[in-house]
Amino acid sequence: MAKKINKLKIRTSKKYGNIGDSPGMIHIDADAKKPLLTLYSYNSEEVQECDGRDFETILKQLDHCHTHTHWLQVNGLGEQRLIEQVGEHFNINRLVLEDIVNTHQRPKFDDYDTYFFATSRIITYNDDELSNCQISFIVKDNLIISFQEDYTDNFAMIVKRLISGKGLIRTAGPAYLCYAMMDTIFDMYFSLLSNLGDRLDDVEDRLYDNPDRSIMYDSQKIKRTMIMLRRAIWPERDKVNEMIRDDISLISADVKVFLRDAYDHCIQIIDMIESYQEITSSIIDVYLSIISNRMNEIMKVLTLISVIFMPITFIVGVFGMNFARQDPLTNKALPDNMPELYSPHGYTYCLVAMFVITIGQVLFFWKKGWFSRF
Amino acid sequence: MAKKINKLKIRTSKKYGNIGDSPGMIHIDADAKKPLLTLYSYNSEEVQECDGRDFETILKQLDHCHTHTHWLQVNGLGEQRLIEQVGEHFNINRLVLEDIVNTHQRPKFDDYDTYFFATSRIITYNDDELSNCQISFIVKDNLIISFQEDYTDNFAMIVKRLISGKGLIRTAGPAYLCYAMMDTIFDMYFSLLSNLGDRLDDVEDRLYDNPDRSIMYDSQKIKRTMIMLRRAIWPERDKVNEMIRDDISLISADVKVFLRDAYDHCIQIIDMIESYQEITSSIIDVYLSIISNRMNEIMKVLTLISVIFMPITFIVGVFGMNFARQDPLTNKALPDNMPELYSPHGYTYCLVAMFVITIGQVLFFWKKGWFSRF
Amino acid sequence: MAKKINKLKIRTSKKYGNIGDSPGMIHIDADAKKPLLTLYSYNSEEVQECDGRDFETILKQLDHCHTHTHWLQVNGLGEQRLIEQVGEHFNINRLVLEDIVNTHQRPKFDDYDTYFFATSRIITYNDDELSNCQISFIVKDNLIISFQEDYTDNFAMIVKRLISGKGLIRTAGPAYLCYAMMDTIFDMYFSLLSNLGDRLDDVEDRLYDNPDRSIMYDSQKIKRTMIMLRRAIWPERDKVNEMIRDDISLISADVKVFLRDAYDHCIQIIDMIESYQEITSSIIDVYLSIISNRMNEIMKVLTLISVIFMPITFIVGVFGMNFARQDPLTNKALPDNMPELYSPHGYTYCLVAMFVITIGQVLFFWKKGWFSRF
Amino acid sequence: MAKKINKLKIRTSKKYGNIGDSPGMIHIDADAKKPLLTLYSYNSEEVQECDGRDFETILKQLDHCHTHTHWLQVNGLGEQRLIEQVGEHFNINRLVLEDIVNTHQRPKFDDYDTYFFATSRIITYNDDELSNCQISFIVKDNLIISFQEDYTDNFAMIVKRLISGKGLIRTAGPAYLCYAMMDTIFDMYFSLLSNLGDRLDDVEDRLYDNPDRSIMYDSQKIKRTMIMLRRAIWPERDKVNEMIRDDISLISADVKVFLRDAYDHCIQIIDMIESYQEITSSIIDVYLSIISNRMNEIMKVLTLISVIFMPITFIVGVFGMNFARQDPLTNKALPDNMPELYSPHGYTYCLVAMFVITIGQVLFFWKKGWFSRF
Amino acid sequence: MAKKINKLKIRTSKKYGNIGDSPGMIHIDADAKKPLLTLYSYNSEEVQECDGRDFETILKQLDHCHTHTHWLQVNGLGEQRLIEQVGEHFNINRLVLEDIVNTHQRPKFDDYDTYFFATSRIITYNDDELSNCQISFIVKDNLIISFQEDYTDNFAMIVKRLISGKGLIRTAGPAYLCYAMMDTIFDMYFSLLSNLGDRLDDVEDRLYDNPDRSIMYDSQKIKRTMIMLRRAIWPERDKVNEMIRDDISLISADVKVFLRDAYDHCIQIIDMIESYQEITSSIIDVYLSIISNRMNEIMKVLTLISVIFMPITFIVGVFGMNFARQDPLTNKALPDNMPELYSPHGYTYCLVAMFVITIGQVLFFWKKGWFSRF
């Protein structure tokens, strides 16, 4: 039975470095992927793309197009030297580098005057399994660096918009690009929630048609996914809020208007999550009341059967007693013992009596409404 | 059985555009209705009404009566060009246009110096089905534009008041008209809540007269409606509060007095919703305790019957044993086997004994109070 | 059965005017009572009382004693013209008049420079029925007007104190009189809570002596009353707080000292309500565990009886079988069939065996502790 | 049974004066104790103690030692004249006097420029009964008056410290003495909580060794005590906080350092109460799951017995039927009726068959794990 | 049975001194360990270590290296004189000394101009037992003193870093060292939580494979550990926050950057604890629903057996009745009594009828789905 049920999996966060480690120490996870570098250099006229696993190539291109705005994608965090090179060349605090590599951060925003640092969590849903990976941004004057754990191409649409050059994307600076990626991440939440909504609908359909114990498991699974989503989105809200409220030179008033829009989406996601959580609780409550009701029905069947058969079984037992009409040893007549057995129609009367009793009981329970709820 | 129960329907919010879409992109929903335009131009002396699906006609009328105050109703959002024309002509931010067309916004208020933007949700109740549609307002110096998803004539009373010219409606400017519509929306909440209160009353009546499982379903349904209402009204509260607190040139001190009144109504709605939620919980608790009690009663019936009949059935079984008084093979007398069967009044004594036992048990359980709660 | 249980009644608040009505519109409820006017004009030397249903008489008296402080009682709100006259003569905002007449306001406080407006709810308990009526105050420089829905004489004590002239009541101005009435209303809460405490005590007594289902209903009823009281008293707290904090010219520092005292009482009422709510929850929890325990006991009785009688009933069944010692057709002896029946002391051994089995079982369950909790 | 269970007692707060009473009215409770006065006059050199029920004696001593600091203890509040004399002589607001006499105050702190007023609640635990009495302090420049409901000598340790002259107690002024008494009251909470912790431990021991219904009652009783303690300590926290934050001339910076320490203790008490509440809930949850499990076990016993005996009882019933091998009237042979009864080893086969069935069933349920949890 | 279950242990906090004790009184616990002193004196060039139980030795070394920064470890708090010497020599407030010795403090931070004081709780997990000990820090200009209850070497890694001289540890002052120790304590929380996560996983595995009552106990135990952890970590958060926000001369801006990082870790720990708590609740809910379902199944077995066997047992009872075909006394024929018994194939028909009834019932319950969930 246990096999048929989808297990609720707890993904215990891996241990965070070693106890007592120096802060700012960069621990590369053993199974971290080798980094892939991609650089997009753009201005209002053109976009240049430059791939390569070599940081020197990237630096050359940065020098070459020093009047362009740059977007450096780092996909995969498995090379300590690269991270350190990036840190040294762009003068990034070691704590930031540690946060980039340690991929269990909550979404947060830190302003360091000449650059700001932000992390988000990308939550995706593949094959009934949630995956939760980290994306970090370093935004400088004319540069944005995005760090991602794996190679998933989450921002293909943004590259497309960059190349097509529509909208503000090429002209509004790296903070706008950062916003655009955050907004894309929020869109993923909407899509995930729509998926979860469908599964809730499905659970609810089963709740009415054929409620079995899988409802409990599935509800709990959805509930947990909600817990995870809520934990990921709540700090996003604070993050976006900080980006709007704080007086950060790298974020222009124009971008703040867009961030306000992203903030609204964030609130909307939180709202949907909370609604879904309440609906899940409501499903569980209904399910538990169904179990109780079913128990009541089972008990009623048992009780009805017992109540009907016990008295008449007793009666047939009475007439199965062997009180003798005549003592076999002395042949003495004992006319007072069970005279009913020797009455010409005793058997018929007995059957009729049992029938009447049974009908009476059925009517009695009918009146009390025991049959009405089957 | 499932057919007789009103299903709880989750309306999963449709997916929000496409992942990674440019912000400010206007997605017209495939099944959005064609827009109907109505323009009311009024000053303290007169009201002119001007219908038409043609934005040019509207613009002409706006020019013609440029000293009037205008109320442009846009019912139906199914024409991208119209929305864009409105945006361009009145110089509206594209994010606002996106919010107008994407009809899953939370109620909110945004001030853009030369105009302000507000959305509300209109929740109506038709044929046991909640519908939840969006209404948006753009308020400028002498103009208010209202955008509505469908053609429902929610504001007929306001048009009537405008035409009759009573009260401040013609003289207090477009912000007052915006307030008047918001207040009408709050009135709808009151009417909806009064309807829900009646249904709660009905559920409660059934709880006492004939509690069956529909109580659970109906309570949960009301609970969900409450969740939905609460989600819709809470941001209204913040919205109205912002309109009162912030220093917005388009909202005069006179209008703020009315907004404060609307704020009080909003708080009152929230209060009622919370009370109803607590009453719903209380009904569910009572229902669950009724199920438990009923189970207890069923079990008592079963136990009483078993306790009464098992011993006497055993007794008749004893006297149904075939221990022989004489061995048929050897004809040896076995006088110690079941002498009761051959006593002249054995049968009578046996019946009397069983009767006494039964009466004794009934009295015992009577004293223990088992009969008192049937 | 339903008849014996006190039903929980939901008093759905009546619909609030009509949807889309002009704000400040005065709706007189069809069953509103005709207003009774009473005017008390007092200074430190004397108190003049002046009754009458005629507003002109009142006005004359106001003119006549224009150096006195006045308390105008309006009991009953069923006359639109009177309300409007009061509004016009004392220059009261129409929204205030609407709030006075619409008797479903939350307690609130509004300051309008030349006067302030406050509402409270008077909750009384008659014949097992809560009634919840509204009292409003308009306080001007040397005048306080109190509006009450019905004719109940809630403030007889204050009139007595006014006439006897003890304390500050005649000299501390109309705001003090307003405070005195609010404090009287709080005293009513204390008296109501003391009543509810007695009923809780009674429910609890029954919980221990004779727990039946009425405990659930009564607890829920008390719970609801608490919900209602809490909803009424929470805004009182904000109201009193506003009166203390805000810089209102009509409320002197001396009166604020008294208001601080009233504030403390208000907090104390909230405290008591919350304690009672927790006690009510605790009673319900105990009750539900009693039901569960009782079920356990019933099941134990049933199980004991079954366990004891089933085996011995089986045994007597065995010896009731008719395996024959001799074939009646062939007269062939069948000495292996049920030889026990033909042993001289078979019956005695059988009875002894059953007795031993029964005693054994009873001892077994005794040891397992099944009897200990009856 | 009800006798053996400790009842949860609700102490309904006595009615607060009469409805509509003048504020500042001093109601002496009918059973209030006669006041005992004790005056300690001390400076850095000496401590003079002066007992007496006569306020004049006290006043003389105050005059006599007018350069000393004084601590006037008033134990018992049963004499209206004394309270009024104290009020007049030290110029105390009547509302303060009312609060001293009305012993149902929440802990609070009021600053009146020339003096401050504070109340606390002393909660003690005697003979399984909580008592909750009020202590009030009036602190002036060189005088502290403490008012207590009864004669309990709660502050013997402080008197001892005063006489021994150790620490700051003689030199740090009356506010320090007030702090010292408050800290003593907090120490009483710690001692009470340690007592409650022991009782929780005891309940938990019984939960594992012999869980019966007393666990529910005892847990609920502890829960209620916690509710009461929390209600008493929360306002203490606000009180101490106010004493630290507000700029009160009578409380020096040195004393504030000590108050900060008292504040920490207060937070610690709140923490402990909340932990104990969560532990109590956890005990109740475990207890309820034990009830459910026990029910399961009882049901399993019943079901096993029924499942085992019903089929074999049926079988012996079959062979107890009286289908005849020969019609006694016609002597016609009926060889098809129950031939098993006339087979030479029918009885043996029958017994063996029943034995096999029983063993089979036991094995089946053994495999399903029904025996594993007994 | 009780033996096999891990008991939930409440560690009731020991009584806090004696009631009414003077504040700042140093109570050495009877079983406190003798203090071990270790002094590390370091500057950017070298680290000197100096052990000894003698405070004079320590003082000499402090004098000797008065330009170094010092870290004085005091492990064990069992010597009142030493604590007082430390207090006098470094001029520490007696309340601070009391807090150091009384090892039941909540984590807190107090700034005293020339030094600051901070406490943390170290929670470790040995042999299925949580131990919770206190560590206090006094940080002065060039000195940090750490006080620890026991001899556990929690900060070996920091000593190692100090000796190796990597990072900022030797140059960033005593506040950085304090931060480093706090961060190490946070790392311990992560390790503890990872351990708890594994145990949750284990409980969950058992929930699906073999749910027995130990799940309830283990979940409750984890829940309590969570309560304890939350109580310990929440004040840490406030503490770190205060250290960042307040303007404390001993904490440089550089150190504050690191504290911000520690703050993030703290938030992350709180997040994980809350997630685990929700997962624990979810496990308990699933477990309770499993109990209910199992009860349903047991009841279904019982009911099925009863429903199947009761009717046929009744039938065999009927044919076991002894209605006679001939009166043995009078030899009168009674042909109407039980003629079935004398029909040639009565027995066969009877068996067939019972078989058909049984099959019918099984099919009926099959259709109702009673077998589907076994």
Image: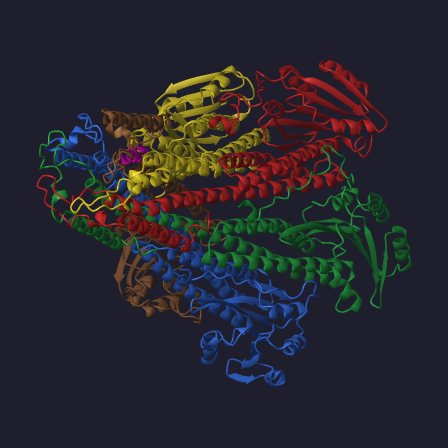
Chain colours: A blue, B brown, C yellow, D red, E green
Task: In this rendered view, identify the residue nearer to me: C197 or B372.
Answer: B372
> Looking at this view, is C64 or D97 the one in front?
D97
Q: Main secondary structure of the magenta part?
A: helix
Please state the horizontal and vertical placement of residue E117, each as a whole percent of the image. Answer: 75, 50
Tell me if B258 is positioned left or right of D180 in this view.
left
Is residue D293 among what the camera can see?
yes
Evaluate whether residue C114 shows in this view.
no
The image quarter containing residue D142 is top right
Residue C367 magenta:
no
| Residue drawn at 55 percent across, 50 percent down | E223
* Residue B311 magenta-highlighted: yes
Is D333 displayed left or right of A262 in the figure? left
**Callout count:** 0
In which quadrant of the rendered image does the C terminus of chain B lie? top left
As displayed, is residue D87 above or below residue E3?
above
Q: Nearer the viewer, residue A115 or A310?
A: A310
Q: Which residues are magenta?
A: B307-317
**Residue B90 on image: x %, y %:** 39, 65
| Residue shown at 58% from the left, 41% from the top | D276
Q: Residue D43, image x and y in percent?
A: 83, 27
Residue pictured at 43% horizontal, 25% vertical? C72
In this rendering, the answer to whether A53 lies above or below B242 is below
Q: Is residue A73 above or below residue A316?
A: below
Residue C95: percent from left, percent from top: 40, 39
Taking the spot 62% from the left edge, 16% from the top edge, the residue there is D80
